[in-house]
Image: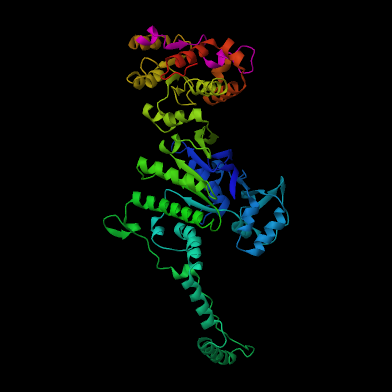
């Protein structure tokens, strides 16, 4: 089973988010954007409120009048039923799902102790007592590896530690496949289960003496027996310990943070490899890894990503929070990247396209031009509304042109006024690179207040004007430049009243809806800026 869709409402900083999931999912954004809140929403869906957590702690804006809800849609539900260990629970789920292979399960704050099942948009009613426990047997196992991970769990084996959960299936398979272990079980049964066994006879004698003494206090007692059950292999391994020899052999708990984190992830890899070699042992896993790159060298980060990609190609599913450009830049068919940002104290989560990826690296991760995988040229625009509009225009109409990296100069959707100073800050590092004579700058028509700053900028970088590298719109904003009479066009008064977020949303809408002919005939200055970028680009494709 894997997750196909997640919906979160009113959980901490997330007012409303809907995420369509892939096999490998990467969430990227600045600190305090709400990435961890998403992962903890899934943890709440699985485990409910923690011991020291109150409902108010998870409510959006701590407003307990709001209903907190996490709804997850799973696919391959029939396979999930087949892998259930409890036959009674499996029968209950089978009767509930019938032939449906997709199921939605929901937890809400109105009754946070129970989860609901939705099939074909209808909520199942009158579920048997204890049905929520059946769901835990049915769902993929949830493993949340957070930055506060207690790494002593690596050195000791228990049913609840990450290593215990992951290795239990592997160890069980190893034991069940061992002739020595099977012989041990047969001998155990012979000793403790056979009524003719000397050990069993002595046990029964002892039980009878206990019964005689017990009868003196409770005359109704007629029998006492001692039953010895076969040992559970987890109990046999309570002294299990992980040691690492990297020149000095010590337990994992005594190693550095980097080694501990790498060991945890290496265990995941070994677990996955063993399962594949033994035809999928046990249930599927959902791995939620917070800051997967933590303490890892960039080379190790790339190796980790490859390992996790392999893991996600079969039963398991990966979700990663990251600040690492290494985990973002490489593309994969089963990968989705989501941008997480906080706008007006509310977390927004949106899937990004390939053309937007360099912007994520450059802006959200604080990267440098070298992180952008050597685009063919740069186009600097004043704000994020231009970025959203042009990214969509290029994707829709000009996918075969040389790749352009668009940089939003202000980088802040809440900044109401944009200045030439922000443009200069974006241009300065590029001016010193091989792109200095190629980068194109697209600016609004300067207002009287900005004219002095614009002239100073042109004087400082004289070649920009000489080479035609700076292009001005005939209007003082993109919103006023949209074709007149269109649903996207705004007057100067309208534009003044708009927030940065609304301008950005309008840029997305215009970029998705405008026709190519309309764009090329009525937005000539922007078309010219694109053509100059393509013409000046390195390795321009031959026509």
Q: Is residue 414 magenta?
A: no
Identify which residue is drawn at 60% across, 23% down.
Answer: 512
Query: Relative to 98, does residue 347 appear above or below in the rendering?
Result: above
Quick check: 442 left or right of 20?
left
Q: Nearer the viewer, residue 33 or 394?
A: 394
Q: Nearer the viewer, residue 106 or 174?
A: 174
Identify which residue is drawn at 47% across, 24% down.
Answer: 415
What residue occupies the far top of the structure in this picture? 466
Where residue 207 sits: x, y (%)? 55, 88
Where residue 203 sits: x, y (%)? 52, 87
Q: Is residue 483 magenta?
A: yes
- Numbered marks: total: 0
Give the prevailing secondary structure in the magenta stretch.
Answer: loop
Using the rendered image of the protein, determine whether residue 392 is visible from the camera's viewpoint. Answer: yes
What residue occupies the far left of the structure in this picture? 247
Q: Nearer the viewer, residue 34 or 293?
A: 293
* Highlighted magenta segment, given as a residue range: 463-491
**Display coloring:** rainbow
Identify which residue is drawn at 58% across, 10% down.
Answer: 521
Where residue 79 sits: x, y (%)? 63, 54
Quick check: 22 left or right of 273?
right
Quick check: 230 left or right of 88?
left
Kindly indicate the quadrant of the structure image that contains residue 480.
top right
Using the rendered image of the protein, determine whether residue 446 is visible from the camera's viewpoint. Answer: no
Kindly indicate the quadrant of the structure image that contains residue 469.
top left
Where residue 5 sits: x, y (%)? 60, 42
Query: Relative to 371, does residue 170 appear above or below in the rendering?
Result: below
């Amino acid at each position: 089973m894997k997750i196909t869709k997640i919906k979160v409402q009113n959980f901490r900083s997330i007012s409303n988010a809907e995420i369509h999931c892939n096999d490998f999912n990467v969430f990227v954004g600045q600190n305090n954007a709400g990435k961890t809140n998403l992962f903890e929403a899934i943890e709440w869906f699985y485990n409910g409120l923690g011991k020291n957590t109150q409902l108010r702690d998870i409510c959006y804006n701590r407003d307990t009048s709001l209903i907190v809800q996490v709804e997850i849609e799973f696919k391959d539900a029939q396979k999930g039923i087949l892998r259930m260990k409890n036959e009674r629970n499996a029968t209950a789920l089978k009767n509930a799902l019938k032939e449906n292979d997709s199921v939605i399960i929901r937890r809400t704050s109105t009754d946070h102790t129970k989860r609901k099942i939705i099939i074909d948009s209808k909520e199942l009613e009158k579920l048997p007592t204890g049905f929520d426990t059946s769901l835990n047997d049915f769902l993929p196992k949830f493993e949340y590896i957070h930055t506060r991970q207690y790494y002593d769990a690596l050195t000791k084996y228990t049913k609840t530690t990450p290593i215990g959960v992951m290795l239990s299936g592997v160890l069980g398979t190893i034991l069940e496949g061992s002739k020595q272990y099977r012989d041990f079980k047969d001998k155990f049964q012979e000793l403790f289960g056979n009524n003719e066994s000397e050990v069993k006879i002595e046990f029964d004698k002892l039980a009878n003496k206990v019964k005689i003494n017990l009868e003196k206090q409770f005359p109704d007692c007629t029998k006492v027996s001692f039953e010895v059950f076969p040992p559970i292999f987890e109990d046999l391994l309570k002294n299990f310990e992980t040691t690492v020899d990297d020149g000095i052999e010590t337990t994992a708990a005594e190693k550095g943070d980097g080694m501990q984190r790498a060991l945890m992830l290496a265990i995941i890899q070994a677990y996955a490899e063993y399962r594949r070699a033994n035809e999928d042992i046990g249930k599927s896993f959902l791995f939620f890894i917070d800051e997967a790159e933590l303490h890892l060298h960039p080379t190790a980060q790339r190796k980790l990503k490859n390992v996790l990609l392999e893991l996600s190609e079969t039963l398991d599913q990966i979700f990663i929070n990251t600040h690492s450009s290494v985990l973002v830049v490489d593309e994969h068919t089963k990968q989705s990247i989501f941008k997480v940002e906080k706008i007006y104290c509310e977390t927004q989560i949106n899937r990004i396209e390939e053309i937007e990826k360099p912007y994520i690296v450059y802006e959200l991760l604080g990267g440098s031009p070298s992180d952008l995988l050597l685009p063919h040229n740069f186009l600097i625009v004043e704000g994020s509304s231009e970025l959203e509009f042009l990214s969509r225009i290029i994707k829709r109409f000009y996918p075969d042109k040389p790749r352009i990296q668009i940089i939003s100069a202000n980088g802040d959707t809440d900044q109401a006024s944009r200045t030439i100073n922000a443009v200069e800050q974006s241009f300065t590092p590029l001016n010193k690179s091989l792109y200095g004579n190629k980068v194109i700058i697209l600016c609004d028509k300067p207002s009287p207040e900005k004219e002095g700053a614009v002239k100073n900028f042109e004087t400082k970088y004289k070649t920009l004007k000489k080479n035609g590298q700076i292009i001005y719109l005939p209007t003082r904003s993109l919103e006023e430049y949209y074709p007149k009479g269109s649903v996207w066009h705004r007057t100067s008064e309208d534009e003044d009243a708009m927030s940065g977020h609304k301008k950005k949303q309008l840029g997305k809408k215009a970029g998705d809806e405008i026709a190519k002919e309309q764009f090329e005939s009525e937005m000539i200055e922007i078309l010219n800026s694109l053509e100059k970028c393509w013409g000046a680009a390195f390795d321009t494709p031959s026509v």
